[in-house]
Amino acid sequence: MTRAFEGDRLLVATHNAGKLEEMAHLLQPYAVEVVGAAEMRLPEPEETEDTFVGNARIKAHAAAQSTGLPALSDDSGITIDALGGAPGVYTADWAETGQGRDFMQAMTRAHDELVRTKAPQPWLAQFRCTLVLAWPDGHDEVFEGVAPGHLVWPIRGRDGFGYDPMFIPQGHEQTFAEMDRWEKNKISHRGDAVAQFVKGCFGG
C-alpha cells in the first residue's frame, strides 16, 4: 500500500521554476506548502544511473537527506521505438552543446538517425516521466507516467519544451508544441505521473 503524505511542506527537488509552479498549482487543494531546490540552496546531484527511476531516486533521496523534508523529484525523457528506446535517459544530453542546451540540435539528431536507419513511419515514440517521493527515513514511492505518440518532421509549433515540436500524442493531430500548456498537461507523461502521485499519496 502506498504511504500517504501527511506533512504540510513538500520539497520539489528541481531548479526549474516552471516545474515548481506546476506542482504548486496541482497540490493547491491539499494545503501543502511547496518549496524548491533553489530556495533551499541545494546542489544538483550527479545523475549516474541508466534508468529514469534510478536518476529520480538519486535526486529525491539526496534532497530528503539534506533537508529533513519529504522530497519529490522527476526524471523524464523521450524513447523512440526505431532507435531502440534512445535517447531515453540521455534525452537532455543530446541537446548539450557546451554553451547550454540546444533542443533543435537534439531533434535534428533524432530525425537524422531515423532517416539513416531507414525506419518506417509512423515513428512511434513515448514521452516518459518517473516521479519519486522520498522521505528522510529512506522510504520512497515511485510513479511512472507515459504519453504514447509519434514523431513528425518538419517540426511544428512554438510552445512547449525539448522535443515537443516533433511529438504528436496518440489520438491528437497537434504536436505538444502547438497545444496550450495546461491542455498539454492533462494528457502529458508528467500529468499522468502526477495524477498517480496525487491519488496514491493524497487520496485525490
Image (cartoon, rainbow, N blue to C red):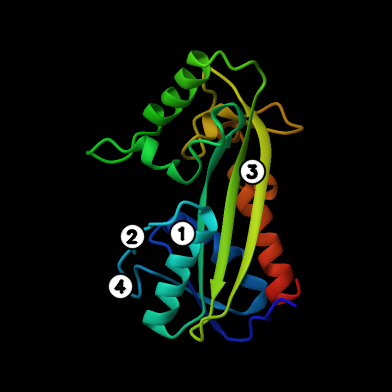
Label 4 sits on residue:
41
Q: In this view, does 192 lie to the left or right of 61?
A: right
Percent position of residue 67, x then y: 39, 82
| Of pointers 2 and 4, the one earlier in the residue sequence | 4
Q: Is residue 178 left or right of residue 1?
A: left
Which residue is at 64% across, 56% downward?
144
Q: Is residue 93 above or below residue 66?
A: above
Label 2 near label 1: C-beta < 8 Å? no
Between 145 and 86, which is closer to the camera in this rendering? Answer: 86
| Of pointers 3 and 4, the one earlier in the residue sequence | 4
Quick check: can you spot residue 13? no
Q: Using the numbered discs, state the Cα–Cα distance from disc 3 to disc 4 in whole angstroms.
A: 30 Å
Secondary-structure class at tag 3? helix
Foreground mark, 2 or 4? 2
Q: Using the numbered discs, state the Cα–Cα distance from disc 1 to disc 2 in whole angstroms.
A: 9 Å
- Amino acid tagged 1: Asn
Secondary-structure class at tag 1? helix
Label 1 sits on residue:
55
Label 3 sits on residue:
184
- Mark 3 burial class by Cα count in 10 Å: few <14, some 14-19, many 20+: some
Label 4 near label 3: C-beta < 8 Å? no
- Mark 4 burial class by Cα count in 10 Å: few <14, some 14-19, many 20+: few
Between 191 and 148, which is closer to the camera in this rendering? Answer: 148
Q: Is residue 144 above or below residue 36?
A: above
- Mark 2 burial class by Cα count in 10 Å: few <14, some 14-19, many 20+: few
Percent position of residue 42, x then y: 32, 71
Q: Using the numbered discs, state the Cα–Cα distance from disc 1 to disc 3 in whole angstroms.
A: 24 Å
Which residue is at 69% across, 49% downward?
186
- Amino acid tagged 3: Lys
| Of pointers 4 and 1, the one earlier in the residue sequence | 4
Between 61 and 83, which is closer to the camera in this rendering? Answer: 83
Q: Using the numbered discs, state the Cα–Cα distance from disc 2 to disc 3 in whole angstroms.
A: 29 Å
